Image (cartoon, rainbow, N blue to C red):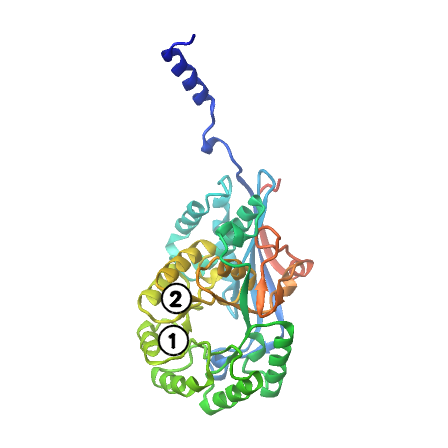
Amino acid sequence: MVSGTNSQAVTYAKATDTKTAAETGDRIAWVKISLSILPLATPVSDAKVLTGRQKPLTEVAIIFAEIRTRDGFEGVGFSYSKRAGGQGIYAHAKEIADNLLGEDPNDIDKIYTKLLWAGASVGRSGMAVQAISPIDIALWDLKAKRAGLPLAKLLGAHRDSVQCYNTSGGFLHTPLEQVIKNVAISRESGIGGIKIKVGQPDTREDIRRLTAVRQELGDDFPLMVDANQQWDRETAIRMGRKMEAFNLVWIEEPLDAYDVEGHAALAAALDTPIATGEMLTSYREHEQLILGNASDYVQPDAPRVGGITPFLKIMDLAARHGKKLAPHFAMEVHLHLSAAYPLEPWLEHFEWLNPLFNEQLELRDGRMWISDRPGLGFTLSEQARKWTQRECEFGKRP
């Protein structure tokens, strides 16, 4: 018989033979950052162009991060910029990417903090975090792939599909007759809602286009408008009151993105919900928006706020305050995040990024459906590679 003392000694000996988590596990071995320029078939104009504040959009800069681990797992993520900033995001991502090497890819929040400190002198919002976004998204993609799950399932999905609305057919450069045709095409393709752009210098033209689209859709089909920050407070309240009759799901960005007080006053004055937040580039900025009751729908953009890690924190805060969710752009990422939101969200449909990926999302019955592919469910296309202008690698690819 082994005495109690000897038994404890044997147990202790076995315990000391056991490796700790720090001594085991996978490690990041290789990172690639690349910049691709995606051309648009037609120059795109919203209200910012018609008011003279911006030039028409002709291309989108896409910054990719590809991460591979010692055990052979790989993740892909992206950020983007329109008109300007793509070169800067790429340059900053290149500067901080080597901090990933040797890290456990599962420790995403730890890595995020490390990358923030690596670029601390340029702040914790804007381009500084947009450069972290492709890396952070790639790490979440990798983590879900390691688990063999779609990202939505890894996060804990509330639904397997998300109601989806189209934006790309209703820009202001598009003649009204073509907008009406685009609306019909979108409905036939299975879209669940339509958003058109407003905010023109002549507000009567906004009402004319809105009237025609509502007549085409009927009274109850979900319809949204987006002013792209081009109204002042007086115009916004007047237009908001005129638009109450159109049964809109929301009025988007009626005021400057940072006018929390103005948006809050507008949201309180109108029956039509207010949506905003797409231009904000940090958790703290969204915190001000949410705590200030400045919108009914919050519209964070994962590539703009710094990736999935801060986006999840924004989701948690928004849900605790009863806000609806309607993420901006990047449906390839936001489908998974929206599926994990407790309140029924909306997903924005843009087909612009389709050429970048070998796989496509499924749209039917007014909703976008999550595939059974693990991670985000995408691999980069040869076309994305051909559009690459700059790239850099760190470490050695296993």
Residue sitting at 31 percent across and 65 percent down?
A: 291
Viewer-proximal residue among 289 and 40? 289
Viewer-proximal residue among 208 and 118? 208
Q: Is residue 122 left or right of residue 218?
A: left
In the displayed structure, would residue 27 be above or below residue 64? above
Secondary structure at numbered mark 1 = loop
> CA separation, marks 1 and 2?
20 Å
Q: Residues within 10 Å of mark 1 (few under 14, many from 20)?
A: some
In the displayed structure, would residue 164 be above or below residue 215? above
Q: Is residue 185 left or right of residue 248?
A: right
Measuring from the top left, give residue 21's x and y in whole percent.
Answer: 46, 33
Residue sitting at 32 percent across and 74 percent down?
A: 264
Q: Is any part of residue 94 visible from this angle?
A: no
Say which label, 1 or 2, has the lower sequence index: 1
Reading the image, the residue beneath label 1 is 256
Viewer-proximal residue among 116 and 234? 234
Measuring from the top left, give residue 125's x and y in whole percent.
Answer: 40, 60
Reading the image, the residue beneath label 2 is 323
Measuring from the top left, give residue 385's x and y in whole percent.
Answer: 66, 58
Q: Residues within 10 Å of mark 2 (few under 14, many from 20)?
A: some
Secondary structure at numbered mark 2 = loop
Viewer-proximal residue among 57 and 256? 256
